[in-house]
Image (tube, coloured by chain):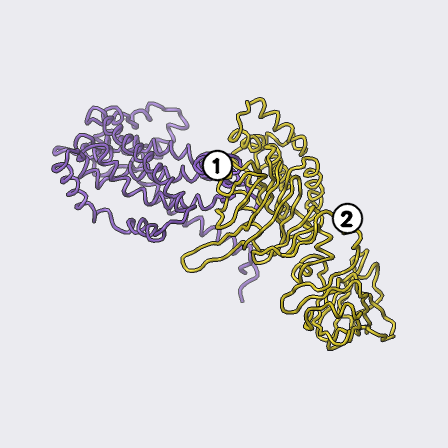
Chain colours: A yellow, B purple
Amino acid sequence: MSDVELDQLTKVYQSSDESVTAVDDLDLTVEDGEFLVLVGPSGCGKSTTLRCIAGLEEVTEGAIRFGDTEVTDDRPKDRDIAMVFQNYALYPHMTARQNMEFGLKMSTDLSKEERADRVDDAASTMGIEELLPDKPKALSGGQQQRVALGRAIVRDPAVFLMDEPLSNLDAKLRAQMRTELQELQQDLGVTTVYVTHDQTEAMTMGDRIAILNHGELQQVGTPLECYHQPANQFVAGFLGEPTMNFLEVGLSDDALVHDEFVLPISSALADSMGSSELVLGIRPEDVILSTADDAGDGAIPATVTVVEPMGDASNVYVDVGTSSVTVSVEGHAAVNPGDEVTLAVDESRLHLFDRATGESYKHSDVEAAALDDADGAVEAP
Amino acid sequence: MIPEEWRLTQDRADFLFDLLSRGVLGLFIVLALFPIYWMVMISLRNPEEIGTSDPSYFVLSLDELRTVVFEGDLDLLASEVDFANYVDMWDQIPLLEFYVNSLIIAGVTTVLALAVAILGGYAFSRHSFPGKRYIGGALLATQMIPGVLILLPMFLLFIWIQTETPFKVVDTYHGIIFVYMTFTVPVAIWMLRGFFDSIPASMEEAARVDGCTRFQALYRVALPMAAPGIAATGMFVFLTAFNEVLFAGILAGGEVTPFSIGISRFQTQQTTYWGQMMAASSVATIPIIILFALFQRPIVEGLTEGGVKQ
């Protein structure tokens, strides 16, 4: 067990005519035993970061430390890590047992019997005892996934590295494996770095999540911190499904001014803004939809375009002028496309971002008390 | 109007296409197999009969075949089929020696060419290095030069080495093996590069995380996965070396005469021992048939299936 520290990690891919910075000056510490999720859109540098930690990519600048040991230039085999790949990378010419045993054979002095015992233990943890004599091609996708995880845990490594391990499973199995993987990690207590592009996986699995974009760290914190207190507009838009609504507004005399509405805000809030060119952010679940025709102070007129019933909730898409806004409503939404409605928002639930830099000036106040108890603090880059 | 029952329905079109494609395929199979049939047939004939101006295309006529099959007249079969050529050919010329020479030359060429081409193909597939495109192109370009064009320069080079240096290369195993490697290694590199390309890099990365060095990841994971490709490439190299005539005739026709050249000694100034020559040729196809029998399955099977999910 050990913590993992990335110190100004930079990775530049150099080809003859151009250089691409995949990871830019990344500082990040994964605590001992922590489940950290690296998340971001494709090309954000999350996989490259993981591969640098694994030693599969050479680091251009910066350092990687496991505990007190610097491993920046160590070979993968000398790092005491185990990795689960997106395509599982099971050796097709070996049985499941040989696949799991291979790492022990190559990296330890264990006797044949000891290795067999370790494999049996790991197999029973993963519930794959019956699959041990089979070769990968005889296994289903979910079974291959379990063997790949078994191959990782049998090593009892200092750090687990997982590169989108669930993305090849169908939706139902993915949800099931998500829970199992979390339980497994909690039981084993091994420091884990998990890469995904799926924000649901990030929100549900991570002790903390680190959001990357264009090779730069946007925010690191607990899932709820990042969700409710995003450091910038990118994080706010990346987390949450349906995504946060953004409306470009101007600040004028204690009010947010949009072409279609004027939303009064408290003068304390207005005074705290660093710019008058703002982006108003509202989570779909924080928008209050009303069919009553009482265009009161701060009400936003809108027209319903699409209603998506989800069973327990409904997504209502409305147009505010030329902008589209998503509203989540519990249960069945009693509106139809074409209906004229009004939207209202509570000031405490508003997010405000600088239009030019995306920097957050105000985030939702929701569950601030609960977040104070959460581990770690919000770190803006 | 075309009558209803003559209409070209989809089913009939499919049937006609099927018939046509099988017909064309059948024609080419006959064209490919007839020389082999002819070779075996002549090898089984009595030497006197072969020289006649009107050789029969069949060992047995239809009438004779009927007698053998339905009346069990094995004596008739024995009188028509003659294995004498298969016995006599070994004494006529030192055929066994030629045969062994060929197996040594083709076998060693295969092992050495594969050893070089596995590393070369792997490097082309996995690494980037300066001039990779040009070196790869140059390897391929060697195949555009007809062998006969480099025969004379190669001959002069061999003579020069022989006379100006202490190395003996003309009419030696290592000399002719070296020549065969120059033809086969470039092709083998390109073939193996393709096979290595089809193995996901994550396989070797998994092996490296599991405790392998790069070289261990190559021979413990990538090589077994490339086994079908290596078998196919090895077969190509072996056949090229085993069948080669042009260079063998000029550079190795004496002490280390290979089978492909030695077989011409059945043709003497007095007569040509066609029966024995064809018998010897039939025997020469045996290692090739064995090779195909051994390697057809792994090649067709495709061992990489199931290891990864894309």
The reply to whether dot 2 and dot 1 touch (C-beta < 8 Å) is no
Residue at point 74% right, 61% down?
A363
Residue A284 visible somewhere in the drawing: yes
Instruction: Compare residues B47 and A18 and report the one nearer the observer.
Output: A18
Q: Is residue A265 left or right of residue B267?
A: right
- The amino acid at mark 1 is Val
Q: Is residue A61 left or right of residue B43?
A: right
- 10 Å neighbourhood of mark 1: few (<14), some, or many (≥20)? many
Q: Is residue A341 above or below residue B110?
A: below
Q: Is residue A15 above or below residue A318?
A: above
Q: Is residue A144 left or right of residue B282?
A: right
Real-space CA distance between mark 2 and mark 1, rounded to the nearest whole angstrom: 49 Å
Q: Secondary structure at mark 2?
A: helix
Chain ID of residue with mark 2? A
Residue designated by label 1: B221
Q: Is residue A346 above or below residue B281?
A: below
Instruction: Compare residues B190 and A255 and report the one nearer the observer.
Output: A255
Q: Quadrant of the N terminus of chain A?
A: top right
Residue B272 visible somewhere in the drawing: no
Q: Secondary structure at mark 1?
A: helix
Residue at point 21% right, 47% down?
B150
Q: Is residue B58 left or right of residue B155?
A: right
Quarter holding residue A280: bottom right
Residue designated by label 2: A373
